[in-house]
Each structure stands twice: as structure tokens, then as C-alpha cells.
Amino acid sequence: MAKARTVGVAVDFSPTSKLALRRAVDNLINKGDQIILITVQPPQAHHTRKELFEDTGSPLVPLEELRELNFTKQYGIARDPEVIGILDTASKTKGAKAVAKVYWGDPREKLCNAVEDLHLDSLVVGSRGLGPIKRVLLGSVSKHVMTNASCPVTVVKGKQSSNSRH
């Protein structure tokens, strides 16, 4: 029997990050694996739990608590039925344990830190498909993580809009 793995998925609740979560569940998660939904809030966000966990990130939050409105208010993350549904599917059909962790700060830095902190075997991130100019100006989280993370990183490309090609 294969060793259970810990797979992180970076989610900002955008369509591309939801696609990355779905692809991770469909293609990477096996029976007994743990899937960790990783979200990074902006450093200027003010939520009740930030003061407690700003340096280390939140404790691992079980799937059952993700459904609660209180959780979304305390951590300032979206209450997204689609994401909960994907995690429910992973839990029920694949026997995976689904949890979440919230960080505050620069997503590039925090996702690379999460790899070490959570002992991830793999990390899945979405790519917004920025054009070359926007990528230089805004920076690419997925490229930074792919270059600097100490585990394998899977980048799931979103649909490129017609504006981002210019």
C-alpha cells in the first residue's frame, strides 16, 4: 500500500484556483491522502484570527468547520459552496482528509513557507495567464512558487482572456 501523501492546493476562490482544486482531487488525490486548502489573505486584512496567527498561519481547520459561517467571518475568507462540494467529494469518494490553513502576507512567500510548514509532498496552484507585461509588473505567484518551493509544484492554467494576450 502506498504511503498517504499531503497535497496542498492554493485557493483564492477565483475560477482558476477552483479549477486547480478540482484537478488536484481528480488527478492527484488517492485514498488516505490529506488535501490542505491553503489560502493567503492580504497583509492589510483585519480579521479576528489574524492577530493570533499572523506569524504562523491558522491551525489546520477541518472540513466540518469550513462550512460554518463563523469560520468565514473569523478568517475573512469566502464561504464558497463549490469549494466545499469539491472537498466533500474528495472526502467521500477518495477517503481523503480535507483541511484548510489560512496565512496572511505575500502569497509567493507564504506558499513557499507552507510547503515546509505543512511538509507537503506536492503543491497545486492556479495560473491567471497574465501576459508578459502584466507578469513583469504584477509578478507571477505560480512562477515564483514553482521556482522556489522544495516540493513538486503543479500549475493549472486558466483560460486566457483576449485582453491578456496583448
Image (cartoon, rainbow, N blue to C red):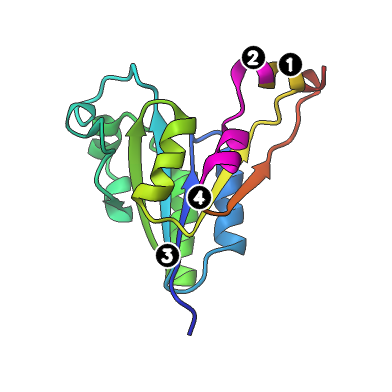
Magenta stretch: give its range.
Answer: 136-149
Check disc 2 and report the residue beneath it. 137
Q: In which quadrant of the rendered view does residue 16 lie?
A: top right
Q: In 3D space, how far apart are the residues under numbered discs 3 and 2 (Cα atoms)?
A: 39 Å
Look at 67% across and 22% down and name the residue there.
Answer: 135
Label 3 SS: helix
In this rendering, the label closer to the viewer, 1 or 3: 1
Left or right of 67? Residue 30 is: right
In this rendering, the label closer to the viewer, 4 or 1: 4
Check disc 3 and report the residue beneath it. 91
Q: Can residue 16 be seen in this view?
A: no
Graded by Cα atoms within 10 Å as few (under 14), some (14 to 19) or many (20 or more), the crowding at tag 4 reads some
Q: What kind of residue is marked 3?
A: Ser
In this rendering, the label closer to the viewer, 2 or 4: 4
Q: In which quadrant of the rendered view does residue 125 lie?
A: top right
Look at 73% across and 35% down and name the residue there.
Answer: 159
